[in-house]
Image (tube, rainbow, N blue to C red):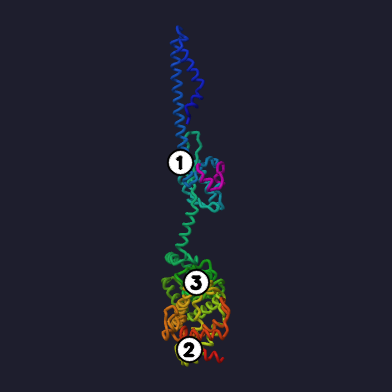
């Protein structure tokens, strides 16, 4: 704003003239002159004119200051509105950008750039549309025509890696000789657009596998009715042993199996097929325009592809059920029911095979990741059978019937113990020991999941002590299953007499001495006597 000193400087000459004239009148310089009255009038009018002029300048200065302040406020609002504002005329050259967002969006100052060059993309149809709409809006004065043209523009455009919301507004000229302008309002909606795309994707896709989900299939069923979809085949697929794999390897590894299975399904099907995760471990494949023979070939490819998925904790095993409908005479849900029944029948036949394969995977896991001796189970098995015979167990006893499975599974719970604890060379902390003791419960749950109920109870009690000081339930004496007591003695002897990751083997004599010391404390005294008697003479 103009201050008093600057204003005086601006009117310095005029003020000097006025002050001189007023001084002359005060000193009576022109007294008696016939022009004195007229001169006094001129000086008075000049003083009024100068005062009025200075007031106008002051008012104008205040208005200019207010206008500048208002302009700065508007610019600040536009700069922080998160939108780019620019205008261009018939030459399509941007004459002004009104906010910093324009430079932020495009990475450079857009002033004097051709608007078509600025918005140019790989979509030639879109480029042509922009040119046509801009020309129509700028050359027409009819508001209705302008709006019809503007409505042809896309609401969101993609420029490089950004998504921009655009809004075009015609600006009519203020005066006859003014050129018409267009204002383009741009908003970077990249994050919002990607979030909406993700929401839209997840509404019809399974988050874990990326396959279609049940909602997509339901929607497809409602909309499909074309004769070209027939014959229509469906395949119900079930990933065998997923719950067991989750129990053995953990849910992260179980998720890897689901992802691997989804990959195998996509590799085995065509682009026109619909592969979906139906729920949990079940998958549904819709095969439009596919007859029974073609469906069987796809099922064969699925089975084969499952064998070649690398990097998984265990080989994929799948149960499949197929059904084909030649014409749209029945409900497609009936087709699903037939395929599902056949899938469960296939699953029932493969259950033992899946259990065997998973046991092999656990044994491999223990050997490769936890440094378990692959011959440990074989040695324990041989010695336990001899001990059972010495204990005069009858051939039809429940113990003997479950002995082989107990030998294979007695260490299975160790897969749930962290490697750094299982192979630690120094003494375990209290917290680590608590974790270590969980292997009995883990093994119990795993054996239960494959319906080995007797073996499960024996695994749970394997670390119980004859005097009741063991874990996890503090059983004592005959409360401990006989199967557990047999294996506990032989397992301890074999562990002591062979190298472990955390210590070297003891001598045979040291192991025998340890068994004698723990007889009646950790181990069944009678069974220990039988084992030692056989061991000492062998």
Q: Earlier in the sequence, mark 1 or mark 2?
A: 1
Viewer-side residue, 494 vs 118:
494
Q: Residues within 10 Å of mark 3 (few under 14, many from 20)?
A: few
Spatial CA span between label 2 and label 3:
32 Å
Q: Which residue shows up at 51% across the image and 66% down it?
A: 272
Q: CA distance from mark 3 to mark 1?
A: 85 Å
Q: Is residue 294 visible?
A: no
Residue at figure coordinates x 50%, y 90% from the top left: 530
Is residue 393 visible in the rendered structure shown here? yes
Confirm whether the magenta stretch covers residue 182.
Answer: no
> Which residues are the magenta region?
98-117
Pick the residue in front: 235 or 377.
Answer: 377
* Residue 142, disc: 1
Nearer the camera: disc 3 or disc 1: 3
Q: Earlier in the sequence, mark 2 or mark 3?
A: 3
The first of marks 3 and 1 along the sequence is 1
Quickly name the residue at label 2.
527
* Residue linked to disc 3: 429
Quadrant location of the C terminus?
bottom right
> Where 392 falls versus 315 (above or below)?
below
């Amino acid at each position: 704003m103009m201050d008093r000193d600057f204003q005086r400087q601006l009117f310095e000459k005029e003020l000097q003239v006025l002050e001189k004239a007023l001084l002359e009148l005060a000193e009576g310089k022109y007294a008696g002159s016939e022009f004195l009255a007229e001169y006094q009038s001129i000086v008075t009018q000049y003083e009024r004119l100068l005062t009025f002029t200075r007031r106008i300048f002051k008012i104008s200065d205040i208005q200019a200051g207010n206008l500048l302040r208002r302009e700065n406020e508007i610019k600040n609002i536009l700069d922080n509105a998160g939108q780019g504002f620019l205008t261009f005329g018939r030459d399509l050259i941007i004459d002004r950008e009104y906010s910093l967002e324009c430079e932020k969006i495009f990475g450079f100052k857009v002033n004097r750039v051709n608007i078509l060059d600025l918005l140019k993309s790989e979509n030639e149809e879109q480029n042509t549309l922009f040119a046509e709409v801009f020309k129509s809006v700028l050359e027409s004065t009819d508001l209705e025509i302008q709006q019809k043209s503007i409505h042809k523009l896309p609401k969101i455009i993609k420029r490089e890696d950004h998504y921009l919301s655009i809004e075009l507004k015609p600006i009519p000229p203020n005066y006859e000789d003014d050129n018409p302008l267009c204002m383009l309002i741009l908003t970077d909606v990249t994050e919002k657009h990607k979030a909406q795309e993700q929401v839209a994707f997840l509404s019809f896709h399974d988050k874990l596998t990326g396959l279609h989900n049940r909602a997509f299939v339901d929607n497809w069923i409602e909309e499909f009715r074309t004769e070209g979809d027939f014959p229509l085949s469906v395949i119900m697929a079930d990933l065998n042993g997923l719950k067991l794999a989750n129990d053995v390897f953990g849910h992260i590894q179980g998720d890897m199996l689901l992802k691997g299975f989804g990959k195998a399904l996509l590799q085995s099907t065509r682009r026109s097929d619909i592969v979906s995760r139906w729920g949990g471990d079940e998958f549904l494949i819709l095969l439009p325009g596919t007859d029974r023979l073609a469906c069987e070939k796809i099922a064969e490819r699925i089975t084969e592809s499952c064998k070649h998925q690398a990097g998984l904790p265990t080989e994929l095993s799948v149960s499949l059920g197929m059904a084909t409908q030649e014409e749209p005479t029945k409900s497609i849900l009936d087709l699903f029911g037939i395929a599902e029944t056949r899938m469960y029948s296939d699953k029932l036949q493969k259950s033992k095979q899946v259990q065997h394969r998973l046991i092999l995977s656990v044994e491999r896991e223990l050997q490769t990741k936890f440094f378990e001796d692959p011959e440990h189970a074989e040695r324990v098995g041989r010695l336990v059978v001899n001990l059972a015979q010495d204990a005069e167990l009858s051939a039809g006893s429940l113990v003997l019937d479950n002995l082989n499975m107990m030998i294979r599974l007695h260490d299975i719970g160790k897969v749930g113990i962290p490697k750094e604890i299982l192979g630690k060379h120094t003494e375990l902390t209290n917290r680590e020991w608590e974790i270590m003791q969980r292997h009995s419960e883990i093994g119990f749950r795993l054996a239960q999941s494959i319906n080995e109920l007797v073996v499960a109870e024996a695994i749970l009690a394997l670390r119980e002590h004859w005097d009741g000081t063991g874990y996890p339930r503090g059983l004592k004496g005959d409360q401990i299953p006989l199967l557990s007591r047999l294996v506990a003695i032989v397992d301890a002897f074999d562990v002591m007499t062979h190298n472990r990751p955390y210590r070297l083997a003891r001598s045979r004599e040291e192991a025998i001495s340890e068994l004698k010391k723990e007889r009646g404390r950790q181990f069944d005294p009678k069974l220990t006597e039988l084992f030692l008697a056989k061991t000492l003479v062998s």
